[in-house]
Amino acid sequence: MSEVENLIYQFDNSQREILLFLHNMLTKEYGLTDKITFKNPCYYNKSWICYLKSVRSESIELAFLRGNELSNVQGILKSHGRKQLRSIEFSEIKEIPIESVKEILQEAILLDEAKPYQSKRKPNK
Protein backbone atom coordinates (compact mmCIF):
# COMPACT_ATOMS: atom_id res chain seq x y z
CA MET A 1 0.00 0.00 0.00
CA SER A 2 1.35 3.42 -0.95
CA GLU A 3 1.88 6.33 1.42
CA VAL A 4 -1.10 8.12 -0.17
CA GLU A 5 -3.36 5.09 0.27
CA ASN A 6 -2.32 4.88 3.94
CA LEU A 7 -3.36 8.51 4.35
CA ILE A 8 -6.69 7.92 2.57
CA TYR A 9 -7.56 5.03 4.91
CA GLN A 10 -7.36 7.40 7.87
CA PHE A 11 -10.51 9.23 6.71
CA ASP A 12 -14.09 8.35 7.66
CA ASN A 13 -16.28 6.17 5.44
CA SER A 14 -17.85 8.61 2.96
CA GLN A 15 -14.71 10.70 2.54
CA ARG A 16 -12.56 7.58 2.25
CA GLU A 17 -14.88 6.19 -0.44
CA ILE A 18 -14.64 9.38 -2.51
CA LEU A 19 -10.87 9.66 -2.00
CA LEU A 20 -10.28 6.04 -3.04
CA PHE A 21 -12.51 6.39 -6.09
CA LEU A 22 -10.73 9.56 -7.29
CA HIS A 23 -7.28 8.23 -6.32
CA ASN A 24 -7.81 5.09 -8.39
CA MET A 25 -9.08 7.13 -11.35
CA LEU A 26 -6.10 9.48 -11.21
CA THR A 27 -3.41 6.82 -10.76
CA LYS A 28 -4.75 3.81 -12.63
CA GLU A 29 -6.80 5.35 -15.42
CA TYR A 30 -4.65 8.44 -16.06
CA GLY A 31 -1.30 7.13 -14.84
CA LEU A 32 -0.58 10.12 -12.61
CA THR A 33 2.05 9.80 -9.89
CA ASP A 34 0.78 10.24 -6.33
CA LYS A 35 2.61 11.95 -3.50
CA ILE A 36 1.67 13.53 -0.18
CA THR A 37 2.24 17.29 -0.24
CA PHE A 38 1.04 19.60 2.53
CA LYS A 39 -0.66 16.55 4.14
CA ASN A 40 -2.89 16.02 1.06
CA PRO A 41 -2.83 13.47 -1.78
CA CYS A 42 -1.32 15.24 -4.80
CA TYR A 43 -1.06 14.03 -8.39
CA TYR A 44 1.69 14.72 -10.91
CA ASN A 45 2.40 14.11 -14.57
CA LYS A 46 5.27 16.33 -15.79
CA SER A 47 4.33 18.73 -13.01
CA TRP A 48 1.73 19.10 -10.24
CA ILE A 49 -1.76 18.81 -11.77
CA CYS A 50 -4.24 18.41 -8.92
CA TYR A 51 -4.81 17.41 -5.33
CA LEU A 52 -7.52 16.02 -3.07
CA LYS A 53 -8.41 17.69 0.20
CA SER A 54 -10.94 17.19 2.96
CA VAL A 55 -13.15 20.29 3.27
CA ARG A 56 -15.52 20.60 6.15
CA SER A 57 -16.28 17.28 7.76
CA GLU A 58 -18.17 15.64 4.90
CA SER A 59 -16.77 16.85 1.55
CA ILE A 60 -13.73 16.21 -0.61
CA GLU A 61 -12.30 18.87 -2.90
CA LEU A 62 -10.63 17.98 -6.20
CA ALA A 63 -8.49 21.04 -6.96
CA PHE A 64 -6.57 21.90 -10.12
CA LEU A 65 -3.47 24.07 -9.70
CA ARG A 66 -3.85 25.69 -13.12
CA GLY A 67 -7.64 25.79 -13.00
CA ASN A 68 -7.72 29.36 -14.27
CA GLU A 69 -6.16 28.10 -17.53
CA LEU A 70 -8.79 25.39 -18.04
CA SER A 71 -11.82 26.08 -20.26
CA ASN A 72 -14.43 24.97 -17.69
CA VAL A 73 -16.98 24.38 -20.46
CA GLN A 74 -18.66 21.97 -18.02
CA GLY A 75 -19.25 24.89 -15.63
CA ILE A 76 -18.37 22.88 -12.51
CA LEU A 77 -14.99 24.35 -11.54
CA LYS A 78 -15.27 27.01 -8.82
CA SER A 79 -12.63 29.56 -7.81
CA HIS A 80 -13.93 30.41 -4.30
CA GLY A 81 -12.04 33.71 -4.61
CA ARG A 82 -8.72 32.11 -5.59
CA LYS A 83 -6.77 33.56 -8.53
CA GLN A 84 -5.33 30.39 -10.03
CA LEU A 85 -6.83 27.36 -8.30
CA ARG A 86 -10.21 25.92 -9.37
CA SER A 87 -11.96 23.04 -7.66
CA ILE A 88 -15.00 20.78 -7.42
CA GLU A 89 -16.45 19.52 -4.13
CA PHE A 90 -18.15 16.16 -3.58
CA SER A 91 -20.04 14.83 -0.57
CA GLU A 92 -21.01 11.48 -2.11
CA ILE A 93 -19.68 9.34 -4.95
CA LYS A 94 -23.05 9.35 -6.70
CA GLU A 95 -22.88 13.14 -7.12
CA ILE A 96 -19.55 13.03 -9.02
CA PRO A 97 -20.16 13.98 -12.67
CA ILE A 98 -17.67 11.38 -13.90
CA GLU A 99 -17.66 12.35 -17.58
CA SER A 100 -17.19 16.04 -16.78
CA VAL A 101 -14.39 15.28 -14.32
CA LYS A 102 -12.68 13.10 -16.95
CA GLU A 103 -12.93 15.90 -19.53
CA ILE A 104 -11.35 18.36 -17.08
CA LEU A 105 -8.61 15.87 -16.17
CA GLN A 106 -7.84 15.26 -19.82
CA GLU A 107 -7.59 19.00 -20.47
CA ALA A 108 -5.37 19.50 -17.39
CA ILE A 109 -3.04 16.68 -18.52
CA LEU A 110 -2.84 18.11 -22.06
CA LEU A 111 -2.00 21.53 -20.61
CA ASP A 112 0.69 19.95 -18.44
CA GLU A 113 2.14 18.06 -21.42
CA ALA A 114 2.29 21.25 -23.51
CA LYS A 115 3.67 23.50 -20.78
CA PRO A 116 4.51 22.02 -17.35
CA TYR A 117 3.60 24.15 -14.33
CA GLN A 118 6.22 26.64 -13.15
CA SER A 119 5.70 28.21 -9.76
CA LYS A 120 5.56 31.99 -9.86
CA ARG A 121 6.76 32.26 -6.26
CA LYS A 122 10.18 33.69 -5.66
CA PRO A 123 12.57 31.22 -4.02
CA ASN A 124 13.37 31.82 -0.35
CA LYS A 125 16.83 33.19 0.26
Image: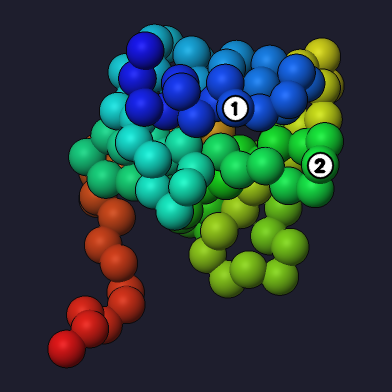
Residue at far bottom of view? 125
Q: Tell me where residue 108 appears, x and y as whole percent.
A: 43, 39
The crowd level at tag 2 (other Cα within 10 Å; few <14, some 14-19, many 20+) is: few
Q: Amino acid at mark 2?
A: Ser
Q: What type is the residue that disc 1 sits on?
A: Gln
Question: Mark number for residue 10?
Answer: 1
The Cα–Cα distance between marks 1 and 2, rounded to whole angstroms, is 13 Å
Residue positioned 78% across, 37% down in the render: 59
Q: Earlier in the sequence, mark 1 or mark 2?
A: 1
The answer to whether residue 94 is above or below residue 91 is: above
- The crowding category of the residue bearing disc 1, from other C-alpha atoms within 10 Å (few below 14, some 14 to 19, many at least 20), is few
- Which residue is drawn at the image coordinates 67% and 42% (left, top)? 54
Q: Position of residue 25 (x, y in %)?
A: 50, 15
Residue assigned mark 2? 57
Does dot 1 land on a helix, a strand or a loop? loop
Residue at figure coordinates x 75%, y 18% from the top left? 13
